[in-house]
Amino acid sequence: MDNTALTDYLKQKKFPIVTKEYKKYLLYEGIQDHHVYILKSGVIKTSVISKDGREFNLEYINDLEVVSLLKDEYSQFIDAPFNIRVESEKAELYQIDRVEFWKDINQNFELQIYVKNYYRERLLKSMKRTQQMLMNGKFGAVCTQIYDLYDKFGVEFQEGVLIDFVVTNEEIAHFCGINAASSVSRIMHDLKSCGAIKMIDRKIFIKNIELIKDNIIF
């Protein structure tokens, strides 16, 4: 998504920057907060906790992007809709008073377009993820998550693409709604056996992306 308007806006303002280290939480689901947070650098993960205590990962974010939902423009405090945790060595985020942010949006046409596109993209991404989760099964869900990691963190390396980010089988399980990391381990073993992937220094190396895509309903 084009974030030029957001970049220009942040350059014009002198917002405070919050720095969090690896595995530290910025927000907890259900806790009230009166700020909007925009990722400046690093990698963060959003997730929710079910009533029985299980964690379900939503997405990794590694680009300049609003990482806390904006909700309505009138409420000074809102309940955080999900957990936000740092997954890189550290992450820097712009911290903006949410009421001030909405006032600025209403006075900036380019920023209004960005926000509309932001909501549209979040909705489409949510619909697509729901479709893939329902239609792909466990094997396809893992392939879908690997493809998402390929899209976010993939770098060309030797005769394939290296996902330049360490992701455990447990984390992949939490993205796919799979209860046991051992199930993901078996699927990863099958993907290795068929020549789709291999592991390099705990990172996934994709040898054949087409074999991954063959198991995904797009």
Image (cartoon, rainbow, N blue to C red):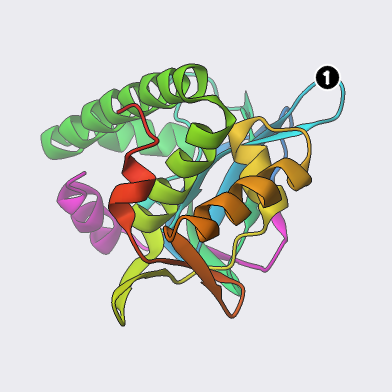
Let me know if residue 22 is in the magenta part: yes
Which residues are drawn in magenta?
1-26
Q: Is residue 201 visible?
A: yes
In the rendered image, the vertical position of residue 77 relative to residue 184, given as above or below: above
Q: Where does residue 168 sit, x and y in percent of width and height?
A: 67, 59
Let me know if residue 172 is in the magenta part: no
Q: Residue at x 68, y 53 (%)?
A: 169
Q: Residue at x 36, y 66 (%)?
A: 207
Q: Where does residue 69 sit, x and y in percent of width and height?
A: 48, 31
In the rendered image, the vertical position of residue 15 relative to residue 174, given as above or below: below
| Residue type of the residue flagged with mark 1 | Lys
Q: Which residue is mark 1?
A: 51
Element under disc 1? loop
Q: Residue at x 16, y 31 (%)?
A: 113
Q: Quadrant of the C terminus?
A: top left
Q: Where does residue 185 sit, x and y in percent of width and height?
A: 69, 51
- How many marks the image carries: the answer is 1
